Image (cartoon, rainbow, N blue to C red):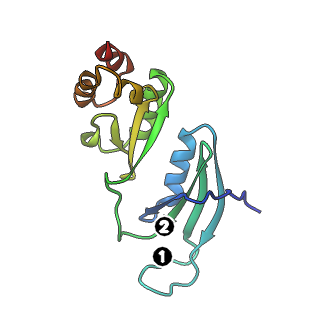
Amino acid sequence: MANKIVAQRISANLWFEGNAEQAVQFYTGIFKNSKTGRVTHYGKPVDEHSLPEGTVLTMEFELDGQPFLALNGGPYFKFNEAVSFIVHCDDQEEVDYYWEKLGAGGDEKSHICGWLKDQFGLSWQVVPRQLGDLLTGPNAEKVMAAVMKMKKLDLKTLQDAAK
């Protein structure tokens, strides 16, 4: 029996165009505290939304304790920047790690102000945990001005702007 991912009351369902397995492998390979869970498959096609019989329909997975469901739903819906996932990083080394890993193969033109789009079109914000404090401190405007000039956030530059 496959590992069951314990669902929280609210969790994310991510719609993919048939590459859900690849996406789950990609994400669970980046986040160290990750696992995959149950997998369902399409049966005999019953409508225009069905993919070929045996194709993965859904995959449960978990990234750092956060449950997700990947759905192979077909080409009907696309990710956009209206929804993104924030990765809170403890230091610049973590910012660099997640920025490089999540951004690999993604749309580099979408990299702005700590935001990136991965190879599946999903938007992520890779930010140092200190950013919230810096943006509410006495020099918040200077910090925001620094953020607006960056692609990947640089913690030292943001801290310097806050002084």
SS category of the residue bearing label 1: loop
Check residue 51 in the rendering and tell me which mark sits there, or answer none: 1
Residue at position x 49%, y 27% in the image? 94
**Where does the N terminus fall, quadrant-wise?**
bottom right
* Amino acid beneath label 1: Leu
Q: Which residue is mark 2?
A: 72
In front of the other: 101 or 52? 101
Q: Is residue 93 above or below residue 63?
A: above
Q: Tell whether 67 sits left or right of 146.
A: right
Query: How far across and how far down the image is residue 9, in percent?
Result: 60, 60
Query: How far across and how far down the image is residue 40, in percent?
Result: 62, 69
Whole-angstrom CA distance, mark 2 to mark 1, is 8 Å
SS category of the residue bearing label 2: strand
Residue at position x 56%, y 42% in the image? 29
Q: Looking at the rendering, which quadrant does residue 6 occupy?
A: bottom right
* Amino acid beneath label 2: Asn
- Earlier sequence position, callout 2 versus callout 1: 1
